[in-house]
Image: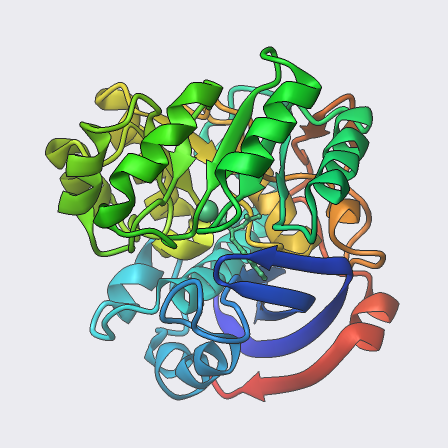
Amino acid sequence: MTIEAIEIRKVALPLKEPFRASVGVFCARDVLLVRVVTSDAEGWGECVALPEPRYSAEYVDGAADLLRRFLVPALPPSVDAHGVAPALAPFRGHPMAKAALETAVLDAQLRARGDSLGRYLGAARQRVACGVSVGIMGSVPELLDAVAGYLAQGYVRIKLKIEPGWDIEPVRAVRERFGDDLMLQVDANGAYTPADARHLAGLDAFELALIEQPLAPGDLLGHARLSRRLATPICLDESIESAAQAAAAISLGAAAIVNVKPGRVGGYLEARRIHDLCQAHGVAVWCGDMLESGIGRAANLALAALPGFTLPADTCAAERYFATDVTEPLDYADGHLTVPTGPGIGAAPVKEVLDELTLASEWLGV
Ligand SMILES: CC(=O)N[C@@H](Cc1ccc2ccccc2c1)C(=O)O
Ligand SMILES: [Mg+2]
């Protein structure tokens, strides 16, 4: 397979309503899509970076610059998916930009041979149980209405964004309104410090499935110490950018559960390595969500169907976030999404919609 051309597209997906987390409030989701055109097929990948470096150090325009100046020029023309990470290794960091390029090459490669990403990764299920991530709201009544709406849509688990000043009270209200059987968890996006340990222990009263990323991404020791103060299992998200970091987190006792996001860890091949590592250590994994378009969403489902993904994914129907998406809708019913079975990631942009939502398109010399 020879790479003939690579395109990067900045696409604006308007959000149905603002999405607020401790890292900020977002009214639109600009995504960076990468298209790789080869002699046999073309493939797509999605960079999950935010418009500003608030979730991690990467951001959309920085990823575009990195792809343009460093990553695409470093790719050998006849590379396959397993050769992408080694070719990009001389450039440190930037897993999200690297993941988009590797995924586009993998998608093209799998399409060329009529193989689906699910089969390639080892999917064990046809459908994935979906939870939903609920943002920080203006009031508890507004939150309760939103949660009721998502439960009515069939979502099997509720995740609440929390931050100092919006944590104990909203969690108590949701637990009291919807009962003890509701699978409930929280995500702080690193908004707390070790000095908040006693306060966070107050969440133990609500039988949460996990508390996600309570402390700063780099503080593995802090999470290990905190895990000895909390009854609620700690799940890491931002802290885990590679299988090596997952191994360190597990051996330090910093993570009882891992939220796996292919974009955050450099791609689906590294995500599978993290899955395999966590399974070997009895650490549950589940698939996170970065408000991807249908491109990333479809690919994530193939990963979320692997055997070690035993907890509901954040990967929900795109309609939860967007009125319009660049791909056809995924098959969502009764709290489950169907894993695409078509070649490659099993989804591709609808040209008219993609062109309508494209803010910028750039062909990069290969
Ligand atoms: C669904 C969910 O909670 N996602 C991330 C956080 C997050 C928060 C805000 C975002 C805004 C724009 C794009 C991606 C974003 C991701 C998480 O699990 O930590
Ligand atoms: Mg998270």
Q: 248 or 206: which is nearer to us?
A: 206
Q: Is residue 7 above or below residue 322?
A: below
Q: 83 or 243: which is nearer to us?
A: 243
- Is residue 282 in view? yes
Picture coordinates of residue 313, whole percent (x, y) = 55, 33
Q: Is residue 360 above or below residue 6?
A: below
Q: Is residue 71 left or right of residue 221?
A: right
Residue sitting at x 49%, y 75%: 52
Residue sitting at x 44%, y 81%: 62
Residue sitting at x 43%, y 73%: 53
| Ligand 1 in which quarter | bottom right
Question: Which quadrant of the figure has residue 329?
Answer: top right
Question: Which quadrant of the figure has residue 179?
Answer: top right
Picture coordinates of residue 108, whole percent (x, y) = 56, 57
- Report the number of numbered marks: 0
Picture coordinates of residue 310, whole percent (x, y) = 46, 20
Q: 123 or 300: which is nearer to us?
A: 300
Q: Is residue 261 left or right of residue 107?
A: left
Q: 361 or 79: which is nearer to us?
A: 361
Q: Is residue 128 above or below residue 262?
A: above
Q: Is residue 65 above or below residue 316?
A: below
Please, which residue is most extreme toward the top here? 181
Question: Which quadrant of the figure has residue 334?
Answer: top right
Picture coordinates of residue 135, whole percent (x, y) = 62, 49
- Is residue 129 in view? no
The colour style of the image is rainbow
Residue sitting at x 64%, y 77%: 9
Q: Is residue 16 left or right of residue 292?
A: right
